[in-house]
Image (cartoon, rainbow, N blue to C red):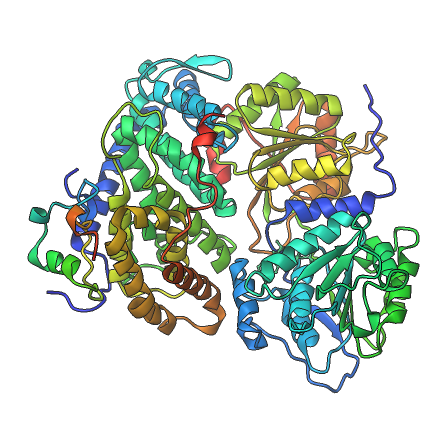
Amino acid sequence: TGTAGGASDSLFSPQSKLTEEELNQFKAKRFTLGQIPLKPPPADLLAV
Amino acid sequence: QRKGLQNSAEDSTLKWYKDLQEAAAQCAQSFDQLNSAKDAQTKKLKLELQKAATIPVSQIASNSGSQLREIFDKIDKLLSGRAVVSGGKSVSTSQHPQGLEFVSYKLAEKFVKQGEEEVASHYEAAFPIAVVASGVWELHPQVGDLILAHLHKKCPYAIPHYPPMKDGTPVEEYQRILGYRVDDSGVEGQDSFLKRMSGMIRLYAAIIQTKWPYSSKQGPVPHGLNHGWRWLAQMLNMEPLADVTATLLFDFLEVCGNALMMQYRGQFWKLILLLKEEYFPRIEAVTSSGQMGSVIRLRQFLETSLQSRQISPPKGQLSSMFWRS
Amino acid sequence: IKEKPEENGKHDKAAQSLLNKLIRNNLVNTTNQVEVLQKDPNSPLYSVKSFEELRLKPQLLKGVYGMGFNRPSKIQETALPMMLAEPPQNLIAQSQSGTGKTAAFVLAMLSHVDPNNKYPQCLCVSPTYELALQTGKVIEQMGKYYPEVKLVYAIRGNKLQRGMKLQEQIVIGTPGTMLDWCSKFRFIDPKKIKVFVLDEADVMIATQGHQDQSIRIQRMLPKNCQMLLFSATFEESVWNFAQRIVPDPNIIKLKREEETLDTIKQYYVLCNSKEEKFQALSNIYGAITIAQAMIFCHTRKTAGWLAGELSREGHQVALLSGEMQVEQRAAVIERFRDGKEKVLVTTNVCARGIDVEQVSVVINFDLPVDKDGNPDNETYLHRIGRTGRFGKRGLAINMVDSKMSMNILHRIQDHFNKKIEKLDTDDLDEIEKIAS
Ligand SMILES: Nc1ncnc2c1ncn2[C@@H]1O[C@H](COP(=O)(O)OP(=O)(O)O)[C@@H](O)[C@H]1O
């Protein structure tokens, strides 16, 4: 079903599938209100 | 580049929702002939098929693992076109060309109704229902999509989506779209409405973290925790609604907060921190004094979680012990 | 075959009260207005629409909301401000069970204790050990965020060392033991009690000795101790007792909600045998979502047979029957309430007096009749009738299997002047329609 509802169909998003904005959100210390990516975080960015 | 909280869900979310609704409508259309049959024999077959699909779901309970396996096997058999015995009679979807669509549709509808009716009053019932649903979903994905479609229709917050009032929609119709029950005596009370919505959100939160333990398939579940992330992120990107948002965030986190925490670790805590520090005040701002209950429950949950850096596993989760029973 | 209806003995009232408590997980809907008689008719009458207005300690507010409450119940709207007022006011309150009395006085006790003082400050007497335990659970839940406040049970079997003094601020128990602890053993200094609660007064006076013991406890308490008395019903005898226990009371009464058949859909199904009845039942199950159902049979034998058939079909069934002890019945009811079983099969007699408002579907596998075989309208109404306009939507299905039972059905229908519609359980669409 591809990207059902904006989520990817796997538990983590490969970094290559994220836009720059999304990646920045995951890299930042905090999320910005209203801009949380709907795709799940990349597996290698779980520690912040 | 969007700024701040939004008034509606993202286009991709809404498109997904609409596609699912369309597919469900098409499915319903496809078995119309069986559904509206007038001859006694077909009617009888329809009754037997529906019973074979729905009675097992109504029998799901947290009594024993072996009992859940039996129920699952019955449903799986039915969806695989094999004969099942129900009430002493043997029935199979192969007896009618539209049998499979009909059974899939009714089954999905039943899972959602069970969540609405039963989980609403017994939160812990979410887990045994979810585990069977998720097992069925894995082997029969068409049922999964139908479960989502039924769920979204009864509880738009499961998408999540806050349907806007469109010009010209009668108030009653709009209340129905929002998930309220409306009948001759009027619209249902807020507490009863919230309870049903809680039931369905809790069922959804249980499904996305659950895998059928006897599954032969490797790999991720068809509708897993990535959807938990999606749901939560989408909720927090939207302007909160009084009463509804706080109630459902609490329900959702109480059920799958622990699983999300284990899965997404630091990123999950970033969500919780944002929720506590920036989003929560926005909830408070739309809350009037008679609606503080849900807000205080959510705050208590967030404070406890952040203080202990821990979210407890939900009550009623099925343990490995359970599956040996 | 006629089976003798089982008599439940002298603890009937207490047992019934307990079972009703156990089966309930919700507030009973009320639309009636509370009647208030103030000790001082000139003082202003406060009532609150939210818990915030009560200015509770934050720990207690959290506790109340943590229990899932959102706003005060009808009786709590008026009773809570009175109970929490300074100086304390005495109160006699009457309303049917399930309207929020226990939650109200538990909140009052928790609000009035001083956790820094390590001695009993609130006494609560209940008619039986089991009922005391239920109240204790509420205290624990509501006091979840107030762990400094401790609770102890004054019940037979709870033996304390001679000469010791209790440190717990709240004591809850039965009148006999409570009296012993206050006078004979002096575990409690009655002069330091600030709140005295007497719960279920109507059940209390039904037991020999309880009335005297309660009065003797009350006599030991200081003049300024707040006295609170609660009862579900209010006969003359309860009223006399209440006045001896509670001086200068405010009085709150909430009329029992009339049970009505207006908000309920009633149907009957025509069958030829009990096997056909069972078949009809299974069709109903296939067509509509029943979270929980209660099925009533005339005899223990039918109930046992039906429960067996249902289990064989894979249903989770609980069987409640008259020969069970109270504890056994309580255990069955609790499992049912917790959703471990979804169908409760019981005999007409055994379930008399149990409120089934929690249950969305009631099935009369046999119609209720009295010992002469005449329709038992009162039982029918109590079982099927619902209260409150936005109460749970209800569905009642009656199984009819003979001319005789058809006749009874007609008489019930005439008595209430409310049509009971025929339902064809072989027609799926028809069954589905009734549930929407
Ligand atoms: N304000 C309230 N809001 C929601 N539920 C309540 C409220 N007060 C009590 N309840 C619940 O309603 C049920 C009946 O209340 P309870 O205090 O036991 O009534 P009573 O003592 O009159 O029988 C209980 O399950 C209780 O938790």
In the figure, residue C45 lies in which quadrant?
A: bottom right
How many circles with numbers are drawn on the protein? 0
- Ligand 1 resides in the quarter of the picture at bottom right
> Compared to B152, does B109 lie above or below?
above
Q: Is residue B261 left or right of residue C124?
A: left
User: Residue B259, position in %: x, y?
Assistant: 34, 46
Give the quadrant of the N terminus of chain C.
Answer: top right
> Compared to B21, does B38 lie above or below?
above
User: Residue C58, position in %: x, y?
Assistant: 53, 72
Q: Is residue C360 left or right of residue B202?
A: right
> Compared to C416, does C179 lie above or below?
below
Residue closer to the observer: B11 or B50: B11
> Compared to C356, does B163 lie above or below?
below
Q: Is residue C430 visible?
A: no
Residue at x 42% of width, y 23% of height: B69
Q: Is residue C296 left or right of residue C67?
A: right
User: Residue A15, position in %: x, y?
Assistant: 10, 49
Residue closer to the observer: C404 or C213: C213
Residue at x 21% of width, y 63% of height: A31
Residue at x 69% of width, y 62% of height: C101
Residue closer to the observer: C405 or C18: C18
Residue at x 52% of width, y 60% of height: C66
In the figure, residue C173 lies in which quadrant?
A: bottom right
Q: Is residue C300 visible?
A: yes
User: Residue B21, position in %: x, y?
Assistant: 25, 42
The residue most toward the bottom is: C42
